[in-house]
Amino acid sequence: MSDIPGNTAQEQQITPELRQWIIEQAQAGYQADAVLKSMLASGWTEDVAIAAMENTLRDHVEQQAVQSGLAPASKVPEPALDESPLYIDVGDRRVAVLQVMASPRVVVFGNLLSDQECEELIALAAPRLARSLTVATKTGGEEVNADRTSSGMFFQRGENDVVRKLEARIAALVNWPEENGEGLQILHYQPGAEYKPHYDYFDPNEPGTPTILKRGGQRVATLVMYLGEPEKGGGTTFPDIHLEVAPKRGHAVFFSYERPHPSTKTLHGGAPVLAGEKWIATKWLREHRFE
């Protein structure tokens, strides 16, 4: 590893020379912990060193992505996770922060919904269930997809008291306008049902995508909330990062994606239910107001 340029550790200033040095170390194959250790040994305080690394590498990756022909990154919903809080106050509830991943941004929340709210959503949704469809990006419509074997339904945004309360809670939790959310979807998975790994954003190369985007732009984040626990199976899987989130009632997993591209590592799926039944509520968040 090369020497850190300049004598800036005394003033703790993030100079262009330091940013270039960080990029060069990453390109040379040094892991983040080794770069951080070198900076600390040279007198940098830990918070400044971490901020310099995170900002420099994020900006570098974004620049490289745009130069490669990808769309610029979009602003995405972001929970208030500065200072690593154990709980987030969303007004009517304290939501627990159980697990956080920075890249991709994946957050597991606990106590997002009460047992009563889970039961109420299931009861309201059950009479309206039908075979789940997926968005048909070739046409802009909907279609039956063999990869998705659940049944489901959509509530209109603000359709009833429990939906309105949950939508306000979600907006506060992830700092995103309520009107940018699609209607709440409730899904029911019986034994053997699954949703094979997929992306939630709309493929910009498909002919039907421009029609879909007219209703509110791209999807930029997903919140999966667990309403009913299966006895076995049914976890939310992220194959690219080897993560599986257990479907614990009242808990939720949030993930965001700043551009419609596999580089976001947000490939995910619903593992087959092996015993019992799984109920979930899904909230997709758009760039703009969803109409």
Image (cartoon, rainbow, N blue to C red):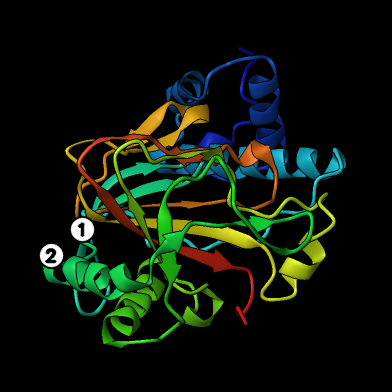
- Say which amino acid is labelled 1: Gly
Residue 129 image-quadrant placement: bottom left
Picture layout, residue 266 above or below residue 165: above
Circle 2 sits on which residue?
A: 115
Q: Position of residue 105 (x, y in %)?
A: 47, 46
Circle 1 sits on which residue?
A: 250
- Who's the residue at 78% across and 69% down the image? 211
Residue 63 image-quadrant placement: top right
In screen coordinates, is 35 left or right of 58? left
Residue 84 appears in the figure: no
- Say which amino acid is labelled 2: Asp
| Residue nearest the viewer, comparing 266 with 278 | 278
In screen coordinates, is 85 left or right of 288? left
Q: Quick one: label 1, few (<14), some, or many (20+) residues within 10 Å?
A: many
Picture layout, residue 105 above or below residue 240: below
What secondary structure is found at the residue carrying circle 2?
helix
